[in-house]
Image (cartoon, rainbow, N blue to C red):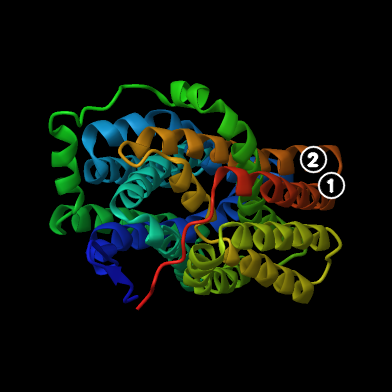
Amino acid sequence: MSVSSPSFSFRSVALSALLPTFVFSIGQGAIIPMIPVIASSLGANLAFAGFLGGLFMMGELLGDVPAGSLVARFGERSAMIGAAIVCLVGLGVCLLFPTTVGLAVGILLSGLSTSVFALARHAFMTTYVPVQFRARALSTLGGTFRGGWAIGPFVAAGLIHATGWTSIVFWVHVVACVLVILILLVVPDPTASLARSRSEPGGERRRVNVFTTIRDNRAVLARMGLAAAIMSAVRSSRTVILPLWAVAIGMADAQTAIVIGIAGAVDFALFYTSGQIMDRFGRLWSAIPALTGLGLSHILLAFTSTEGLFIAIAITMALANGIGSGILMTVGADLAPRDDPARFLAAWRFTTHAGEASAPLAISGITVIASLATASLTLGVVGLIGALLFLRHLPRHVPRVARPDVG
């Protein structure tokens, strides 16, 4: 990535912003697809396993409430270090208390920490990166998450195959969190100069919480936030419904991890393409194909009973999600005030994470009432509705950014 301007180069954020995110997401990629599988091995049925898988997203939602204030008060790097420590506590609970209750508490803490960690990098990139490079920068940030999510399942599959112990995946994330802390302590962080400018006269920001910000921005959040929440819901449902579907059709744990890892690699391969599409042609050209593809894939999954077709649909979901890499972070950054983005982005992420957290709960509830196939079909239809909402509201709230000259 050689894109640069007199005031910005991707190299300036590679070690401080992208490397910690990549390492952290490798740990996430190892554990999250395995949560429903581990829950099933602990005696949970499909519906309850789906609920436990959704607790990670619920933790992210709850973490959005203090995240904006924490990042604004302590700074991005300190917030990320604290988040990694909290995540270590949650992983310790999962390992020391191998029950469904222990798993629930540990996964909830992991989700809380992830919210703070992700917001810290999002807020920094929003402030630091010039607007003409924003989509590519945030898609690259999203791509680092996807890269880790692509590698994590393969690491998990290898360790599970070698040891026969599915819960060993928690140790992958333990190592990742420790490495993140070490990286953040050693690598110089460009946010220091931003922190100094914020402390200068006139740089003091108004102290408000996430709910006040939601109230102040309720009009845009009601329109764009609903569309974004639907996209988050359909995206997050993949991480729960695919492992559950694999369990339902009898796939082995290691094979499930490999399939999800391959899908993650496909997803990761498209992150920079998504950013180029958004910067050159507009945000709509990423949002609509992504939601349409995800919606149709969920609908097709409802009629799938063979491993071959399951693998094909998992790859199709990854393609659709990859085209939308970074879209929600980019739109949130477009809407946020540049001088003080953290609190608006916390409100934006709270809205999107509400959708993200609702999907696994919906899968669990609909599976109890009807079936897993009905849950997949329902989420597919919701995804198509989300595409229509983006088509209507996105051009009104996010005007086109002029195409930059790229060398």
> Which residue is rendered at x = 77% and y = 64% of the image?
249
Q: Position of residue 286 (x, y in %)?
A: 60, 62
> What is the secondary structure assignment of the residue under circle 1?
loop
Assess disc 2: are there few (<14), some (14-19) or many (≥20) residues with their C-alpha within 10 Å of its C-alpha: some
Q: Position of residue 180 (x, y in %)?
A: 27, 56
Q: Is residue 203 left or right of residue 397?
A: left
Q: Quadrant of the N terminus?
A: bottom left
Could you tell me which residue is drawn at 56 percent across and 57 percent down?
A: 283
Identify the mark nearer the N-term, 1 or 2.
2
**How many circles with numbers are drawn on the protein?**
2
Task: Give the position of the C terminus as an image quadrant.
Answer: bottom left
Nearer the observer, 270 or 172: 270
In the rendered image, residue 83, in percent from the top left (x then y), is placed at 32, 42
- Mark 2 falls on what kind of element? helix
Q: Contact (CB < 8 A) between labels 1 and 2?
A: yes
Task: Return the residue at label 1.
Answer: 371
Which residue is nearer to you in this view: 264 or 97? 264
* Amino acid at dot 1: Ser
Q: Is residue 96 left or right of residue 231?
A: left
Location of mark 2 (residue)? 366
Q: Residues within 10 Å of mark 1 (few under 14, many from 20)?
A: some
User: Quadrant of the rendered structure where residue 307 is?
Assistant: bottom right
Q: Please tell me in which quadrant of the rendered image residue 353 appears.
A: top right
* 109 to 325, vertically: above or below: above
Residue 233 shows in the view:
yes
Q: Position of residue 368 (x, y in %)?
A: 80, 39
Q: CA distance from mark 1 to mark 2?
A: 6 Å
Under mark 2, the amino acid is Ile
